[in-house]
Image (tube, grey):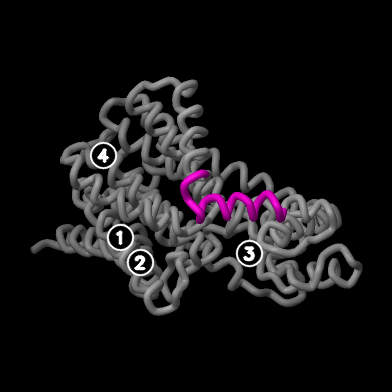
Amino acid sequence: MNTSKIVQIISTTSLIIIFSLGFSVQRSSTSLYLILSALALTLITTKKTFRNTLKLCWKTFPGWTIAMLTLAIAITIREIANPVIQLRYADAAYRLFLAPFLLTLIYESKAGDIKIIKWSWLVAVILMATSGYFNYITTQDIRPHSAFTNTIPYSAFCAVFAILFVTINQSGKLISAACLIPASAVIFYSQSRGVWIGVILATAFLIINAYNISGKKIFPTIALIAILAYATSDLFSSRADITIQQTMDFFNGNREGSVGMRMQLALASYYIFIENPLFGAGRNLLPALHELYVNGYITQSVSDAADTHGELFYNAASLGIVGVIYYLIFYIFTTVPFIQAMKQEATRQVGMAGVAISIVFFFTGFTHITFGLSMYASIYASIQVVLLTAILNAKYPKT
């Protein structure tokens, strides 16, 4: 067996494990992602063909490459300016930084065949639903998650895996249903408002584009389903009631509760941004939050928060206008390649899947720092790499 075949097998197998076991086996995704990245950097350094492929990836997806590289650079520069440098805050961002090199490896080695990889997304959904159920049995916590993950990203990634599998898998309605049913349970019982909104809008986007149905028909249907869910589901109605009540309470002076605390943190981000508009206060916001608490702007319950529970808010507070610009660059330039892919019949399904997952993560990002941990960033980057490899294979097929 020649070296190129070994690299292909290692790369494909690693991607399958990253997706299928990433949320079930702790550190499986982060470790394998680093191994693949090290392999990619080694081959790019030693092989001219890989260097040429890196140039091709840059030429084909320049905006996407910039979006992947920028955050790690911005955080590193900002942390170097601090009296105490804490580069651990850049760990997850460096997983995104490595994505263009990983794309080079996967495309050049002919790994990451989406027809094979898609089955790992189905396995991931089944394992995540099963893990969530067993976690409920042992802890009585109805919101699905594993021992080492938070409910919000857990359900968001489960939704993304289901969207990827169902969109890419064009044959077999039964197997698609077998994926959608457990994923729907994970999403519903997560009670995550950001995930719910993201999934609903992503689903609407997919239906409109797959069946050429007018949005004028889709959105009234969504509204009707929401009304029926409110009338028939205690879980849904109680979540909606809590959201409305806590929002009203916040404006009446009671700033506690899930909604109130998130709104406090959004305001805290604004205050920090106003004080540090250019480069922010750094990724460690604890000193800034403590100062806001001492001055009476926020309550003690949020003064020790690790972040401000929203990607836009956290980037604005920690990196200033640089963080806001990065936020816009990230979601625009990681979505544009897939919008373009939708225009070609050969890559239409891949393009639809890519746009749909951007919608899910965008709205989830208003309630959680989706890519704040290296695990989530590693899995997200791997998803992007597989989808973009499919686009590259359609544009520049390897013989």
Mark 1 and mark 2: Cα distance apart in space: 8 Å
Q: Front-most of 145 and 16?
A: 145
> What residue would you read off at disc 4?
393
Split into 4 quadrants, where in the image is the C terminus?
Answer: top left
Disc on res. 132: none
The residue segment tinted magenta is: 231-246
Q: Is residue 235 left or right of residue 125?
A: right
Q: Residue furthest left?
A: 1
* Of pointers 1 and 4, the one earlier in the residue sequence: 1
* Of pointers 4 and 3, the one earlier in the residue sequence: 3
* Of pointers 1 and 3, the one earlier in the residue sequence: 3
Amino acid under disc 2: Gly
Image quadrant assignment for residue 126: bottom left
Q: Is residue 284 left or right of residue 21?
A: right
CB within 8 Å, label 1 to label 2: yes
Element assignment for label 2: loop
Split into 4 quadrants, where in the image is the N terminus?
Answer: bottom left
CB within 8 Å, label 1 to label 3: no
Q: Residue at x 72, y 62 (%)?
A: 261
> What residue would you read off at disc 2?
22
> What residue would you read off at disc 3?
76
Q: Residue furthest bottom?
A: 138
Element assignment for label 1: helix
Mark 2 and mark 4: Cα distance apart in space: 26 Å
> What residue would you read off at disc 1?
124
Q: Front-most of 203 and 349?
A: 203
Amino acid under disc 4: Asn
Amino acid under disc 1: Ala
- Give the image location of residue 77, x and y in percent: 67, 62
Amino acid under disc 3: Thr
